[in-house]
Amino acid sequence: MRALITGGGGFLGRAIAERLLAGGHELRSLSRGDYPELRAMGVETRRADLADADAVRSAASGCDVVFHVAARAGLWGPYASYYDANVRGTEHVIDACRAAGVPRLVYTSSPSVVFNGSDLENADELLPYPDEYLAHYPRTKAVAERLVLRAADARLRTVALRPHLIWGPRDNHLVPRILARAARLRRIGRADKLVDSTYVDNAAEAHVLAAEALDRKPEVVSGRAYFISQGDPRPVWWLINAILSAGGKPPVRRTIHPRLARWLARGCELACGLLRLRGEPPLTRFLVEELTTAHWFDLSAARRDLGYEPRVSIDEGLDRLAAWLSAPRG
């Protein structure tokens, strides 16, 4: 199999690349940055932005499957930048698949596309998209997911995966943010709200299984979205403290009332908007809602249709994370 990974140099993209290389597949990566470590692994690397439709089309040429992982993440920034990366970029990927005759497209979505601000407990894929979003990331990812699922037809088989809170060694988003804010963190609300998470190798495995399922049983999988996680929800502040512990940091002990946190988040957003400050506010309304609500999901569909089972447990993943964080860098 010859595969293209958009964002192959990123955290999840590289994990998918390693999983595919272990299976003997040929790989091509399309990323904005230069990743010599991918070339050293035997991956053909191309450097371009998803806004360059011709570059995307060229990268997809000759491929059997595209893993569209690249996206603009984060909780703050101009809507146009999120739209261009997450929606326009996805449009270019779909168009490239059609132009190059690529038969399979696996899209990395997010459970946040259906987050409605309330507790999601054992939620399944019947959950509808909400009418309102508190951040541009879930809003644009939801638009892109719809595009991918609607593109499914006899020529192009598509599937969207919704892995929740991906973490593990080489994480350049969730783990470093938690560790960098260790001294300033405050527990918001109740400590017992359960959340799902996904160890990065399990998320990568799910992507490969989805590509195989699109080949073996497209009539079942194509045009569908699937939640992916550890299937082992834990209290959100337990998970945060476990990541802090892996990084040699003390647990979060101080608390703040959710009502005050929401008021502070609105103030931070307003100040950053009026002053046109660069960087993300220290607190946003979306983050407050994420930290004060339950969100864990029914994996029955992924298990049944994709054959997905999380092979790496949370405890084993935390041990691996701690070993990576403590290893010397040079």
Image (tube, helix red, strand yellow):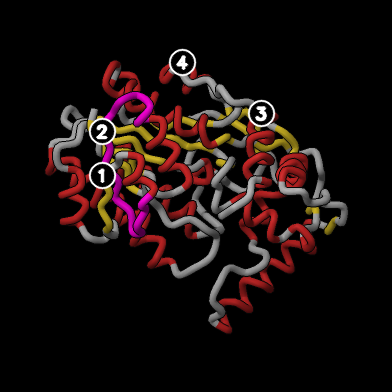
Residue at the image point whose x is 80% and y is 53% from the top: 187
Q: Are marks 1 and 2 in contact (CB under 8 Å)?
A: yes
- Vertical comparison of 5 with 300: above or below: below
Amino acid beneath label 4: Arg
From the image, state whether disc 4 or disc 3 is nearer to you: 3
CA gap, disc 4 and disc 2: 28 Å
CA gap, disc 1 and disc 2: 8 Å
Q: Which of these two is toward me, 27 or 204? A: 27
From the image, state whether disc 1 or disc 4 is nearer to you: 1
Q: Are marks 1 and 4 in contact (CB under 8 Å)?
A: no
Secondary structure under badge 1? strand
Residue on which disc 2 sits: 26
Residue at the image point whose x is 58% and y is 68% from the top: 280
Secondary structure under badge 4? helix
Q: Are marks 4 and 3 in contact (CB under 8 Å)?
A: no
Residue on which disc 1 sits: 44
- Vertical comparison of 132 with 110: above or below: below
CA gap, disc 2 and disc 3: 30 Å
Amino acid beneath label 2: Glu
Residue on which disc 3 sits: 316
Asked if residue 324 can be seen in this view, the reply is yes
Q: Position of residue 232 (x, y in %)?
A: 66, 27
Q: Return the disc, 1 or 2, that comes first in the chain's sequence.
A: 2
Magenta range is: 20-36
Q: Position of residue 289 (x, y in %)?
A: 67, 52
Q: Which of these two is toward me, 250 or 133? A: 250
Using the rendered view, name the quadrant where residue 21 is placed: top left
- Left or right of 45, for residue 264: right
CA gap, disc 4 and disc 3: 25 Å
CA gap, disc 1 and disc 4: 34 Å
